Every structure is written in structure tokens, then in C-alpha cells.
Amino acid sequence: MEIKQLRFFLEVYKQKSFSKASETLHISQPTLSKVIHQLEEELGIRLFDRSTRHLQVTEEGEMMRTHAHKVMREVEDMQKAANDIRLRKKGSFHFGLPPVIGSSFFPNVIADFIKRYPEVDMHIVEEGAKVMEQSLLEGNIDVGVGILPVDHEQFEVLPIVEKKLQLVVSSSHALAKRERVEMRELKNEHFLLFLKGFSLYDRVRDACIQAGFEPNIINESTQWDFLIKMAKENLGITFLPETVFAEADLSGTSVIDIENPQILWSLAIIWRKDSYQSHAAKEWVQFVKKTFADQGPTWAPNKT
């Protein structure tokens, strides 16, 4: 079995088409079909059902995809390690950063790191926390910021900070003069949330379900400032981390504490378990750890 066969198999799986996969791989379709057929012969199973109009992945193919991804990640780790040895320098890494976290916490941290390690090549990838977790597992990024909880069996976890989500409503909203509200009181409200796939979406929805109702979500966005503007116009209510408010225009709105349940926003640096980490990535993790530790006891375990 060759690495090339696995790479070709994963590309056909991704494209669900031999013709599209052959284009992205820059080989002829007959050559690609021959390679996949040889892999099937070697494994003794069919990976794709070619009898239908649209190419279908077989049940066996679905199972083999997991193993193929694991092998390819190991190959990529080996290539990264060899590159570090060959270049004898700090190296490079890809850092996954959810947008709302990036604007709240990391601009100064990243700037200080680059000043200290100018030879390091940091590639910042902006993705929602849930999408970023998948990117970590697939080896597309090396280290990222996760919103807890995450799967400890798949990720190494370094907690860095815990904050609260707070409710934002228009100053003309019926709840505007309240200091705190319980989640159940929001049952009949229109919800303005971050896009599905963002952990903040899941945290708010889970809190609603815990309070006994499914939220009526009328709009989703990737931009916290847009959500605030929508709430300001009394088009709905939204929930944001308290750290956002330092740089947000909150005129015309009220910020209210949430209870029963309180929605906590716990952040951690995460990376795939047993994955190779370049010197640069290791330096970054240690730098972030020290930076947040020096800021004082911003992290506190959830005792509720």
C-alpha cells in the first residue's frame, strides 16, 4: 500500500467524483480509477459504488476513511519533524482562532510573541470553534483556541481563562432596567446568535434547553458588532462574552447578567493528542500560558 493511494482515495471521497478528483490531483481520470481499483484489490473491499448515477461511498469506504486520515496525519507529522531538523530553525505553525475570541484576547498577545520570535512564521486561521476542532483533528492547523468543554480523549487542553456570557437588549426592551434575568424568562424572545458551528451558538441553545425551551433563532451572524446593532434596534436579543464590551459601542443597549443557568465561556489552548508539534508551536503554547498566568487568576474552575 502506498501513501499516494490513500491520498487519492481521500480526494475522491471528498469530491464524490472521479472526474473532479482527477482535476484537483492533476492526473487523468483513467489513472486515478486504476489507482483506486488497485487499492480496493489490495484491501479486498469496495470503497466506492460506481453503479449509480452519482458516485456513492460504500460502508466499507466510510470505515477506511478514518484509518486513511490517521495514516496521512502521521505522514504529515513526520514531514514537519523532518522539516524542523533540516532547517534548524524555530519553524512555522498554523494557529486556529475563532473570530470573537481573536478580537477580545489575542491581538496584543500575538504582537508580543512576534516581537520576541521574529523568525517564527505564524499562520492565523479564523474559524468557528467547532469547525476549528475538526481542522485540528484533520491536521490542517497545529494549535488553536477552544471553548470548553472539548473532548479530552482527542485533545490536549491548557485552560487559560473563564468569563461569562451576558444578555444584550435594546434600551427600549422590557427587560432593559433589570440587573439580571433567569433564562426561562426569555422563552418568548427572538434570539440573535452567532452562526451555527460556533461554540457560542451551542452554549446559548444548550442553556435555553436546560431552562425548558427551544430558542426562536431569527438571525445568525459571525460578527458580534452586527449582533449588537440588531439588538439595539430591538430586533431581538443577543448574548456576548463580557470581554467584548470593552471595545463595543453599547449606546442604546442594556447589558444584563444571566442566571439559571449562568452561561460560562471557558477558553483553552488545545491541540491534537499525540500529534507532532514544531518548536514554534511549542514556544507559542508556553508563551500564551505564561502571558495569561502573569495577568493573574483569570482562570477559575467551574464550581457550579
Image: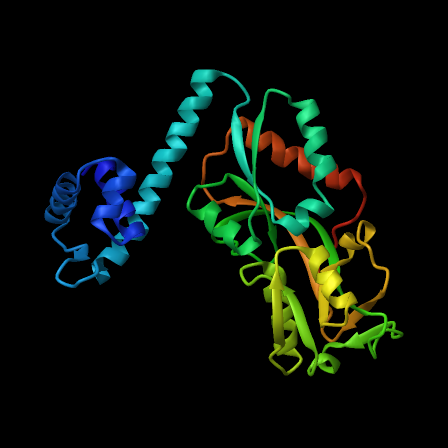
Q: Is residue 79 left or right of residue 127?
A: left
Relative to 93, residue 18 above or below: below
The residue most toward the right is 177
The residue most toward the front is 233
User: Which quadrant holds residue 186?
Assistant: bottom right
Quadrant of the rendering where the C terminus is positioned: bottom right
Quadrant of the rendering where the N terminus is positioned: top left
User: Which quadrant holds residue 188?
Assistant: bottom right
The answer to whether residue 290 is visible is no
Relative to 251, residue 157 above or below: above
Q: Is residue 72 left or right of residue 248?
A: left
| Image position, residue 226 (x, y; %) | 70, 58
The residue closer to the viewer here, 68 or 196, is 196
Identified at 82% across, 68% down, the residue is 256
Q: Is residue 225 left or right of residue 277?
A: right
| Image position, residue 293 (x, y; %) | 75, 40
Identified at 33% across, 46% down, the residue is 69
User: Which quadrant holds residue 217?
Assistant: bottom right
Identified at 83% across, 79% down, the residue is 174
Relative to 187, residue 226 above or below: above
| Image position, residue 200 (x, y; %) | 63, 61
The residue closer to the viewer here, 97 or 303, is 97
